[in-house]
């Protein structure tokens, strides 16, 4: 059976780790797009402009297909990768974890950095509220005004979430539906005369 749920975090959470004078602060953010990531990373760099590094990793999409790691000047593989590893270990997506570092004057070495970024990310994620969401698909149904009752009955019987409505001679409704129910509902709608259903996107 298709798995149509995924785990993410409900709201921003933070965590801290200190080692030999260096202070690491981890932030976990719920995100939906790469645009969200860009804005949050830019805002964090601006807010904590005095930090020596702003390292991060993110995973996006219900299938976890989009991800990126960034070491922000730390030795390759010592920051973004351990942060990414913590996200994976909790099986999360639609999440961005940023760890900022205030350098304490003593170099930590490769293993020390990996541990520090791992622990900071882990603390932030452990302090977050993890929630489960359904994979939803967005469709637009176009139909003749005379078919209004038939279309509305199908949407209301299955309590389908309507996002937008246009009721004229040719009517349109944009709706969101859990992926595992999508085929059943779209098939029912398309059996109505002069009705067209178009897939828009997955959320």
Image (spheres, helix red, strand yellow):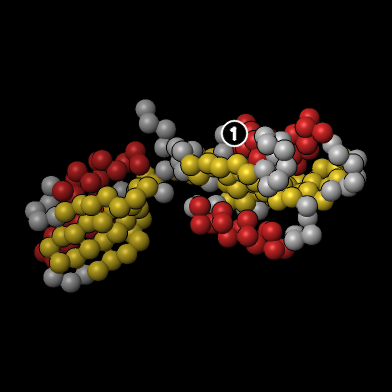
Q: Is residue 175 left or right of residue 35?
A: left
Q: Is residue 111 left or right of residue 7?
A: right
- Residue at the bottom extreme? 168
- Residue at the left extreme? 193
Q: Secondary structure at mark 1?
A: helix
Viewer-nearest residue: 119 or 45 = 45
- Residue at the top extreme? 1
Which residue in the protein does label 1 denote? 88
Residue lying at 26% horizontally and 56% vertically, measured from the top left: 140
Q: Position of residue 138 (x, y in %)?
A: 33, 52
Q: Is residue 1 above or below residue 68?
A: above
Q: Position of residue 154 (x, y in %)?
A: 23, 51
Residue lying at 19% horizontally and 45% vertically, measured from the top left: 188
Q: How many marks?
A: 1
The answer to whether residue 81 is seen in the rendering is: yes
Q: Position of residue 108 (x, y in %)?
A: 84, 36
Q: Position of residue 152 (x, y in %)?
A: 23, 58
Callout 1 crowding tier (Cα within 10 Å): few <14, some 14–19, many ≥20: some
Residue 44 figure quarter: bottom right
Residue lying at 78% horizontally and 36% vertically, measured from the top left: 113
The answer to whether residue 115 is seen in the rendering is: no
Q: Is residue 176 above or below residue 179?
A: below
Residue lying at 65% horizontally and 53% vertically, measured from the top left: 12
The N terminus, quarter of image: top left
Q: Is residue 203 left or right of residue 148?
A: right
């Amino acid at each position: 059976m298709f798995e149509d749920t995924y785990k993410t975090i409900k709201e921003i959470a933070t965590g801290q780790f200190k080692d030999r004078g260096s202070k690491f602060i981890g932030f976990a953010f719920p995100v939906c797009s790469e645009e969200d990531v860009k804005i949050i990373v830019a805002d964090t760099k601006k807010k904590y402009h005095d930090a020596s590094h702003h390292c991060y990793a993110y995973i996006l999409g219900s299938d976890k297909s989009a991800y990126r790691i960034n070491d922000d000047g730390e030795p390759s593989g010592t920051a973004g990768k351990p942060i990414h590893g913590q996200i994976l270990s909790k099986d999360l997506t639609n999440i961005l974890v940023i760890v900022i570092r205030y350098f304490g004057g003593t170099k930590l070495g490769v293993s020390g950095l990996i541990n520090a970024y791992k622990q900071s990310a882990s603390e932030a994620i452990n302090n977050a509220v993890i929630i489960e969401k359904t994979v939803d698909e967005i469709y637009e149904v176009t139909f003749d005004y005379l078919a209004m009752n038939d279309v509305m009955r199908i949407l209301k019987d299955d309590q389908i979430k309507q996002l937008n409505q246009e009721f004229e001679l040719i009517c349109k409704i944009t709706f969101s539906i859990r992926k595992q129910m999508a085929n059943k509902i779209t098939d029912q709608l398309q059996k109505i005369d002069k009705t067209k259903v178009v897939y828009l996107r997955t959320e």
